[in-house]
Image: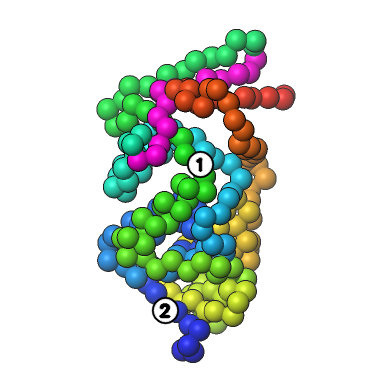
């Protein structure tokens, strides 16, 4: 192995919420995890920044402080605009298995927090590691690593593609999105509002036949 080669038990490609969460759980179980992020933190991503109680439960399971004093905005339900002039107000259901609140946090801050949490659990974070291609075992045709744009090589028995909705790594392995499944697209912008402490998360819908 050359000086630019890193060996690990698991490579996680993509340090978004999915990749960092996976890296947290794997590192917490004693595995040597290489977490690869194509940019450097803090960085922006499209979509965010609201989290339902189901997602909140996963953050609590990771051991992340979700209190308002830790920088989170809590909400008690979803306000949906669609189909009529007045919105539907849907409080989060009271279920024993989920917390009673959802969360809001800026996406750039949220992703960096999760990546840092993974590092705290023992994962090794490699920023500016833009994966360009998989490394395949010639005997088994299995993926055994990846190479990055800057010439680094990462090798591991397991490689997890958490590189976003388009997943270039998955495509390079011949895996493509199923056209028979629906897809939702979100657009996010930040602006100043007197309702920035609203305790409902809003959703604006347009539906076609």
Q: Secondary structure at mark 2?
A: strand
On the image, which quarter does residue 23 sit in? bottom left
Residues in magenta, as a range: 70-83
Instruction: Name, please, the residue furthest toward the right.
Output: 209
Q: Nearer the viewer, residue 31 or 143?
A: 31
Q: How many marks?
A: 2
Q: Nearer the viewer, residue 103 or 177?
A: 103
The answer, for residue 173, to whether it is visible in the render is no
Q: Is residue 16 left or right of residue 119?
A: right
Residue 164 % position (x, y): 57, 53
- Residue at 49% x, 76% y: name it: 154
**Which residue is disc 2 drawn over?**
7
On the image, which quarter does residue 148 sit in? bottom right
Q: Nearer the viewer, residue 73 or 169?
A: 73
The quarter of the picture where the C terminus appears is: top right
Q: CA distance from mark 2 to mark 1?
A: 33 Å
Residue 187 % position (x, y): 65, 38
Residue depth check, mark 2 versus mark 1: number of the one nearer the observer: 1
Neighbour class for label 2 at 10 Å: few (<14), some, many (≥20)? some
Where 209 falls versus 166 (above or below)? above
- Residue at 33% x, 36% y: name it: 69
Q: Is residue 132 left or right of residue 116?
A: right
- Residue at 47% x, 51% y: name it: 111
Where 139 falls versus 160 (above or below)? below
- Decide whether residue 81 is among the magenta residues: yes
- Decide whether residue 144 is among the magenta residues: no
- Which label belongs to residue 106? 1
The answer, for residue 74, to whether it is visible in the render is yes
On the image, which quarter does residue 66 sit in? top left
Q: Secondary structure at mark 1?
A: loop
Instruction: Name, please, the residue furthest toward the bottom.
Output: 2
Indicate which disc, 2 or 1, sits on the residue closer to the N terminus. Answer: 2
């Amino acid at each position: 192995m050359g000086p630019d080669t890193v060996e690990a038990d698991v490579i996680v490609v993509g340090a978004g919420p999915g990749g960092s969460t996976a890296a947290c759980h794997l590192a917490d179980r004693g595995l040597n995890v290489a977490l690869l992020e194509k940019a450097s933190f803090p960085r922006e991503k499209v979509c965010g920044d609201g989290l339902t109680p189901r997602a909140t439960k996963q953050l609590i399971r990771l051991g992340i402080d979700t209190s308002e004093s830790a920088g989170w905005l809590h909400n008690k339900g979803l306000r949906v605009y669609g189909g009529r002039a007045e919105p539907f107000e849907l409080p989060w259901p009271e279920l024993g298995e989920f917390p009673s609140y959802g969360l809001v946090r800026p996406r750039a801050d949220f992703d960096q927090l999760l990546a840092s949490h993974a590092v705290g659990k023992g994962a090794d974070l490699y920023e500016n590691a833009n994966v360009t291609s998989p490394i395949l075992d010639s005997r088994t045709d299995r993926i055994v690593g990846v190479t990055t744009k800057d010439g680094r090589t990462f090798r591991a028995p397991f490689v997890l593609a958490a590189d976003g909705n388009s997943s270039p790594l998955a495509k390079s392995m011949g895996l493509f999105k199923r056209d028979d499944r629906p897809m939702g697209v979100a657009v996010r912008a930040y602006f100043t509002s007197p309702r920035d402490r609203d305790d409902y998360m809003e959703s604006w819908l347009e539906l076609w036949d």
